[in-house]
Image (spheres, grey):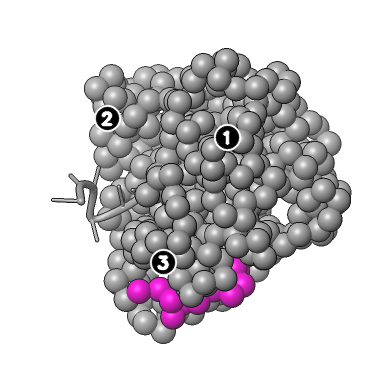
DNA sequence: ATGTGC
């Protein structure tokens, strides 16, 4: 994208003035190099989002943004139900409540290095990964509904997790007002054997080491010590969320027409929040959120089991579990007045600053951990929500490195075997059922995650706390 | 993201 197309507000803030049907401006947070690397489509999509009814403030773009279905991935948009605001399946994303969790272990990197090969093999056996992966868990109809209503809380009740985890998960591990009865039989059938599985694409489970600390006080509060090992899981709501997204996308095309909405792009299909379809989507989406929260809790349990086999005394504690494909009801200050808004974050992470009442007591003074998954082999970051994020982006930040290259282009440039060998030579063990998947996820196919998080920090969205380097990667 | 593809 040519930066000259944008109004530069400061080094990391760019604006597109409202023109035509745009109701609000679009605001992009990125440095000039990231802007230059962004596809023109990102500006076009962010501007299209700005035309939707009931949008409040601006259509926001995070520094890792790239072109998505309708809404950009790395997009944030808040809608007011009292101003005709809408909810959009494409504004949440297909993988509903896809997110990241990081668990601390207190293990020193050297201890893990000694058993690295065997640990990688054990994790690969314990964590079903890949397209259509199925787990050891099969749910009947009653258990499916209980899972969709209870989320991670349900998983803990079943013995696949620990009660202490729950306060470290958004919504206390359970999305309220979930409606399993709004989830289609087909979506439930697809999920029947998929609980506790990783899936494919950019999903992974990594053993990582804390390689750099930027904010020692926050790192201490988060339990992140230099040289210690953590487990990070990136996964979502698997087949169920995807099926719900697909079904409601179609329904919303019809609903938008019925509501008389003129859309600049068919992919922006949406429904008024107050409409029948809107309410039904929100109920189903919250059920899918619970599916994702339960799934990450179960995967965390599997990882704990493996680590305890190698290190019987290990205490694996959840630092935080946060989604980056969501639509949430939140209260935000808009021009000095609190308003209840439906905040869409698609490829964007909630980033509550210090003092937010929804944070657990142990984290409240510091702020919310913001977990940023980098690409395989490069590193990930833990940030903390900045006090200014509320006013800058409805308390949101980036979610990852962001793709710089299509999956197809990546498979032309690299082979999976070559990537696995190169990473092994650098001491990073990759285990994956799909060498094509590994090629698609090659580190070179992603933007520089360090530049992305630095831009987020300079823009006042979130501050860097620690950088995590990969040791073992179980890849879908 | 996805029992990857209208």
| Residue density around tag 1, few if under 14, some if 14–19, many if 20 or more, within 10 Å | few
Q: Which mark is residue A19?
A: 1
Q: In this rendering, is residue A313 above or below A30?
A: below
Q: Earlier in the sequence, mark 2 or mark 3?
A: 3
Q: Seen in the image, is A170 located left or right of residue A73? A: right
**Which quadrant: the C terminus of chain A?**
top left
Callout 1: SS: loop
Image mark 1: chain: A
Q: Secondary structure at mark 3?
A: helix
Q: Quadrant of residue A194?
A: bottom left
* Residues tagged 2 and 3 counted as in contact (Cβ below 8 A): no
Residue A182 is one of the magenta-drawn residues: yes
Q: Position of residue A248 (x, y in %)?
A: 39, 63
Quick check: is A56 in the magenta stretch? no
Q: Quadrant of residue A196?
A: bottom left
Please report, as a chain letter, where disc 2 is located.
A
Residue for badge 3: A258
Q: Are marks 3 and 1 in contact (CB under 8 Å)?
A: no
What residue is at 37 percent from the left and 82 percent from the top? A141
Question: Which residues, given as a range, are shown in magenta?
Answer: A173-184
* Residue A408 tag number: 2
Q: Residues within 10 Å of mark 2 (few under 14, many from 20)?
A: few
Tell me which numbered mark, 2 or 1, is placed earlier along the sequence: 1
Task: Tell me residue A374's x, y (percent).
Answer: 52, 32
């Amino acid at each position: 994208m040519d930066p000259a197309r944008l109004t530069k507000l400061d080094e990391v803030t760019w604006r597109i003035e409202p023109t035509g049907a745009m109701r609000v401006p679009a605001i992009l947070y990125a440095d000039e190099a990231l802007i230059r690397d962004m596809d023109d489509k990102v500006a076009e999509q962010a501007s299209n989002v700005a035309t939707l009814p009931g949008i409040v403030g601006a259509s926001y773009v995070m520094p890792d943004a790239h072109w998505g279905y309708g809404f950009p991935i790395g997009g944030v948009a808040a809608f007011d139900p009292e101003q005709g605001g809408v909810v959009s399946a494409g504004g949440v994303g297909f993988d509903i409540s896809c997110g990241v969790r990081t668990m601390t272990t207190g293990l020193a990197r050297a201890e893990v290095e000694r058993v690295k090969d065997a640990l990688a093999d054990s994790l690969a056996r314990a964590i079903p990964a890949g397209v259509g992966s199925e787990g050891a868990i099969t749910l009947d109809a009653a258990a499916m509904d209980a899972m969709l209503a209870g989320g991670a809380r349900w998983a803990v009740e079943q013995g696949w997790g620990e009660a202490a985890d729950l306060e470290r998960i958004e919504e206390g591990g359970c999305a309220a007002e979930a409606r399993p009865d709004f989830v289609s039989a087909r979506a439930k059938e697809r999920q029947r054997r998929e609980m506790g599985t990783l899936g494919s694409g950019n999903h992974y489970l990594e053993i990582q080491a804390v390689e750099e600390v930027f904010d020692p006080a926050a790192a201490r509060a988060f339990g992140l010590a230099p040289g210690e090992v953590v487990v990070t899981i990136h996964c979502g709501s698997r087949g169920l969320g995807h099926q719900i997204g697909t079904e409601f996308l179609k329904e919303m095309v019809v609903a938008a027409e019925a509501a008389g909405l003129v859309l600049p792009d068919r992919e922006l299909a949406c429904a008024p929040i107050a409409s029948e379809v809107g309410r039904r989507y929100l109920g189903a989406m919250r059920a899918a959120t619970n599916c994702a929260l339960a799934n990450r809790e179960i995967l965390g349990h599997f990882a704990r089991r493996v680590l305890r086999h190698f290190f019987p005394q290990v205490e694996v504690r959840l630092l935080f579990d946060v989604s980056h494909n969501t639509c949430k009801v939140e209260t935000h200050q808009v021009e000095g007045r609190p308003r209840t808004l439906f905040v869409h974050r698609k490829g964007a992470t909630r980033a509550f600053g210090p003092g937010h009442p929804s944070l657990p007591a142990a984290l409240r003074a510091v702020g919310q951990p913001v977990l940023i998954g980098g690409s395989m082999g490069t590193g990930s970051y833990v940030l903390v929500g900045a006090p200014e994020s509320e006013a800058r982006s409805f308390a949101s930040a980036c979610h990852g490195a962001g793709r710089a290259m299509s999956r197809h282009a990546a498979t032309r440039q690299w082979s999976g075997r070559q990537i696995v060998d190169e990473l092994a030579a650098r001491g990073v063990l990759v285990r994956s059922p799909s060498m094509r998947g590994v090629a698609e996820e090659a580190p070179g196919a992603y933007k520089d995650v360090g530049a992305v998080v630095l831009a987020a920090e300079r823009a006042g969205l979130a501050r860097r706390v620690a950088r995590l380097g990969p040791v073992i990667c179980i890849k879908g």
